[in-house]
Image: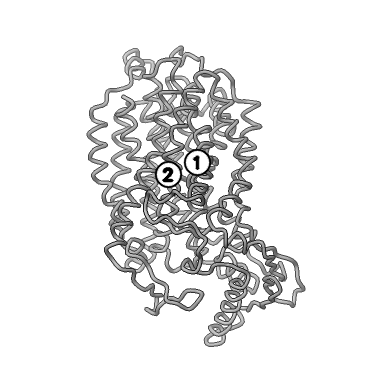
Amino acid sequence: MILASSAGTIFEWYDFYLYGSLAAIIGAQFFTSFPEATRNVFALLAFAAGFIVRPFGALVFGAMGDLIGRKYTFLATILIMGFSTFLVGLLPGYASWGVAAPIILIVLRMAQGLALGGEYGGAAVYVAEHAPANQRGYFTSFIQTTATLGLLLSLVVILLVQGYVNGNWEPTPVLDAAGAAVLNADGTPKMIKAFDLWGWRIPFLGSIFLLAISLYIRLQMNESPAFKKMKEEGAQSKAPLKEAFGTWKNGKIALIALLGLTAGQAVVWYSGQFYALFFIQNVIKVDSFSANVFVAWSLILGTGGFIFFGSLSDRIGRKPIILGGCLLAAITYFPVFHALTKTANPALYAAQQTPVVVTTDLSTCSFQFNPTGTAKFTSPCDIAKATLAKSSVNYTTVAGTPSSGAEIKIGDTVIPSYDAAALSGTDLTTAKSTFEKAVAEALKAAGYPLTAESNLTVAKANHFFDIFTGQKLAIVVILTYLILLVTMVYGPIAAMLVELFPTRIRYSGLSLPYHIGNGWFGGLLPATAFAISAQSGNIYAGLWYAIIVAACTVVIGTIFVPNGTHKKDIFAD
């Protein structure tokens, strides 16, 4: 029963997280008309679109699960997920379909989110309603591994396909909209690997085979005995959503579950797995293959923690383990991510110790969170900050006089910015080229590695088993610590949520707070954290989002979440 529930759920998470693992690559294909910083945020928001609609999927499929049963809801969710993933692999990019391509991509991501909104609650309830009373944490922890195993499966497939495609097809030059070659900061032509250009589609297209396997597995499953008994007795809810959320008695449980459990669990989960992966690739500048290898190994080493903490929660309770994980995350995130930067890219970390200051009229600085790509950042302040953000520069911004424009001071070198709104044509091109060249030279003098080829200190894995050096093992250990925090907060959460709600509304009741927590608080974390860091000029500032939410969950959970739910009879009602 556990294998049947878990296998289909793993494949569904695999489909959902393929996009997250390839967000930067897909962003370059579907959002090519936007600046790099905007493109990264937009790519992450397209990833987050699937999370935004998850609570609505929880409402739709949660009600379906309480009305017609757990099994048939499972079948509906896997079909929607499988076909949506397959279509992403077929979807032409921005160069072929223009703005229609990213719009359709986001629609498909939303379809995936709706399906996942019904998937998790069904799997958790299905297993819990089969499990022995004193082992609900242990048995449901196998369902908790499915999200991480789905992510791991997506990384392994990506690594295999990436290695094969890039090993058999040569890189090609990157061209702009006019067909001219795009240059690196040092003037060399920018190249794109075959996997980044078209090979990324293969894992999406291959998901059609996983869909066939999942459907076969799901068709062999029997209905939950608790649901069958409730249906035979005519005791099922006629309006599960109204019963679950229309009264304060049950609505209060959902609110406590959200703010006192799932919100903190969600930010720790997505910080430890997805934001860590995004941070390594896009901020620390480790190549995507190596980053995937390091994260994959941390998942392999840390996944057993789900079973351990799930089983432990059967003995000491769920609440102290979940809140303990949130507290540890809030306390240790800053030193852990600092250590990750210092270990994975020593040259970048050393260069970041050189003071960089942007002096400007602060009233001309915009908040550079531009997911639609419609805003024009043309002021000297915006140009200076965007240029520094691209190279992962830590800088501070100080107020200057209104007439002073903006200037960047890197060590002892001062570089004036330019006003793009006041220039046009050749003058604008010359000013841009002169400014970017001066900044690149100053950053290079300060030790910043401007191209991957020039950085001999950054961690690099040549194949999946190339981790046995001091630097690479240290990276894996740091990432495994983050995964263990994930297992603390996530391992016992399914059993805890099942125990909070009565059988009649259990599917609907637990699905909504879980998916609001993980869909909104967690799913929006990578885009939010990246935007905070880009705006503040500090690559670690985005961690404040996760730290504050986790700390609030510790306080609210300590006061309002009940103790001893692991001893509860979930069929007493």
The residue depicted at 42 percent of the width and 26 percent of the height is 140
Position in image of residue 85 (x %, y %): 32, 49
Quadrant (top left, top right, bottom left, bottom right) of the N terminus: top left
Query: Residue 176's image quarter?
Result: bottom left
Does residue 243 appear anywhere in the picture? no
Q: Is residue 386 above or below residue 273?
A: below
Name the residue furthest right. Answer: 401
Q: Kindly identify which residue carries mark 1.
A: 480
Position in image of residue 455 (x %, y %): 51, 65
Name the residue furthest front. Answer: 469
Quick one: SS at disc 2?
Answer: helix
Q: CA distance from mark 1 to mark 2?
A: 8 Å
Residue 294 as seen in the image, left or right of residue 163: right
Count residues near mark 2 (Cα–Cα under 10 Å), then give few for <14, some for 14-19, many for 20+: some
Give the label on residue 390, or none.
none
> Is the residue under label 2 in contact with that under label 1 (CB below 8 Å)?
yes
The residue depicted at 37 percent of the width and 65 percent of the height is 94
The residue depicted at 55 percent of the width and 19 percent of the height is 316
Q: Tag 1: residue type?
A: Thr
The residue depicted at 47 percent of the width and 13 percent of the height is 569
Position in image of residue 383 (x %, y %): 60, 72
48 or 558: nearer the viewer: 558
Residue 201 as seen in the image, left or right of residue 143: left
Q: Is residue 261 above or below residue 424?
A: above
